[in-house]
Image (cartoon, rainbow, N blue to C red):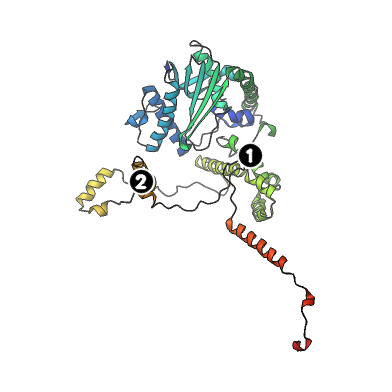
Amino acid sequence: MSVKNKKEHSELSPSSSSRWCSCPGSMIYIDLPEQVKDYTAEGTKAHDLAAYCLNEGVYAEHLMGFTDSNGKVQQADDKTMVSNVNEYLSVCYSLSEDNFVKMIEQSIDLSKVYGIPEQFGRADFITYDPEEKLLTVIDYKNGYTKVSAKENKQGISYALGAVDSVKSFGEVEKIKIVIVQPAIKSCDVWECTRSIADRVYLKAFRRAACRAWDILADYKIHKKEPDERNFTPSEENCRFCKGKGVCKALAKANLESISDDLAELIEVNPEKTPEVIEQAVENVTGLSNEQLSTIYSNIGLISNWINAVQGIVLQKLIAGESIPGYKAVLGSAGNRKWSDANEVEKIMKSLRLKKDEMYSFKIISPAKAEKLLKSNPRKWARLDEQITRGEPKPVIVPEADKRPAYVDKIDEEIDELCEQKGEQAEEFEVCPDDFEIDETNLL
């Protein structure tokens, strides 16, 4: 059974379930316009390509083109995208090879899962193995931010919702969540029993969904904004939230993380904010290591907020709204490029341009050379000797990172030298009585 059903997500979207479970106040922002980024369009195209291939039972490199979710014919000409989609397809095919039930881009009814009517979401790929009584949810992620399969709320939502869809083929005793992220070479897997999913996650979903739904209803019907305790700003919660540019809780959290005075200042005397920020910048060198740690842990969140503020200001200006002191203008045009390379080539030849004038050549990169010669280690060894790399630069990572801590060697050498000098000074003790001063020589 292969099913395809194209519907959009509902208010309680499973893809944002991690956010509305922990930050239910964010529900008031779900109707704000989406800020479409290049990576959003790229991710949509990759998902459409993957769905087309799964329905046709092929890999992406065999396609000249494909039909996307809007019925338009697209070119499968992005080699990186094709390679990434193929990795995802390989996982899907291998985990569903002998399974009759395969659901591709299936709209899953989540009303029973969340306890709220008319809630649903679209799963990338679900397959069911009746012999193992195993339901597997495979989710394709096109981005570079690591997504864990362990207790993944989106995956568990789809798994619990899909149980009814496969009950005519058998019982579900186990569920498996697979997150495929080819961009970072990750395929994360997590498994749990159906009984645990029902006993723990189903109850948790219904409590969180009820709370989020009440907040949304109060806001839409009574225009009542949720209080602060219903907002939980964090880098994960705010990354894809539509409201991060206008969220007061996020703004306050960011300002407080930089300076204790800023949160109050932004409400009482906002025109003095630049002065306080400038002072906060000057005070950075005097912060304790504990203070630096607290501020640094919020840098990603602050950066997301700043980008969101820039986006919402531009959005409002383009819509004709007035933002005091600013306006939107058209920036520089994009880089020049040929509209038809083949036609340009013909014209250049007719103009009697020489080949070295028409074309620019450069040697291939080490990565491409290794790919060409990887089947012949002896040949590759000759080129490998010619590779040079710059010294790695220090980067900041969480303390749990497996790599050893780096300390500047120069500082270590200076400390070692100082220790050696100290030892030598201790060995040579000066006694004033050892010196006789001839006062006549002082004249």
In x, y percent, where is residue 61?
Answer: 35, 32
Give the labeled residue for mark 2: 380
Q: Tell me if residue 160 can be seen.
A: yes
Tell me which residue sits at (64%, 41%) in the image: 251
Q: Does residue 105 appear left or right of residue 13 in this picture?
A: left
Identify the secondary structure beneath mark 1: helix
Residue 73 picture location, percent across and down = 35, 29
Disc 1: which residue: 250
Q: Secondary structure at mark 2?
A: helix
* Amino acid type for the residue under numbered disc 2: Trp
Query: Outermost residue, top direction?
Result: 168
Figure quadrant of residue 112: top right
How many numbered tags mark residues here?
Answer: 2
Provide residue 419's location: percent of width, then percent of height. 67, 61
Q: Is residue 4 left or right of residue 234?
A: left
Q: At which x and y percent is residue 98?
A: 42, 18
> In this picture, is 345 found above or below 168?
below
Tell me if residue 45 can be seen.
no
Quarter of the picture holding the C terminus: bottom right
Corner quadrant of residue 79: top left
Q: How would you rate the neighbour count of disc 2 (Cα within 10 Å): few for under 14, some for 14-19, many for 20 or more?
A: some
Q: Is residue 356 left or right of residue 76?
A: left
Type of amino acid under label 1:
Leu
Number of the front mark, 1 or 2:
2
First of labels 1, 2 by sequence position: 1
